[in-house]
Amino acid sequence: MAAIQVTDKVLFEAPTGIILNIKVFPNAGKNEICDVQGDFLRIRIASAPVKGKANRECLRLLAAFFKIKKSQVIFRKGESSRLKQVLLEGVSREMVVKRLKERDD
């Protein structure tokens, strides 16, 4: 996979961590972080958006990808929408950008 190019509209700093604007595509073939589309990081989730299952998978995927605890990944906006804002608590911008650039590890 190629490195992801992030902008200040996709990722920005908050007092307690980093906020990501994401666009979730449920019912995908697999869970994966894809690329940037406009102002959003595209994420594919295999689960259906039923009873919060896709949201839980999304949080789990982000926690595993950024190598942080699931409790550090918090929805700020958009729990019932494909367009979401997620707070990654206790991480730096540099760490998030580095991990996105190295995503083919």
Image: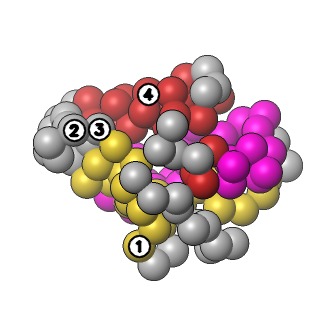
Answer yes or no: is residue 20 visible: yes
- Residue 2 image-quadrant placement: bottom left
| Residue 33: percent from left, percent from top | 40, 48
Secondary structure of the residue carrying tag 2 is loop
Mark 4 or mark 1: which comes first in sequence?
1
Which residue in the rendered view is the most extreme toward the right? 15
Check if mark 1's residue and mark 3's residue have beta carbons within 8 Å: no
Q: Which mark is residue 31?
A: 3
What element does badge 1 sit on?
strand
The numbered disc on residue 79 is: none
> Pointer 1: what residue?
37
The reply to whether the magenta stretch includes residue 45 is no
The residue that mark 4 highlights is 60
In this picture, is 79 found above or below 69?
below
Q: Of helix, strand and loop, which one carries label 3?
A: loop
What stretch of residues is rendered in magenta? 73-98
Alpha carbon distance from label 1 to label 2: 19 Å
User: Image check: 102 left or right of 97?
Assistant: left
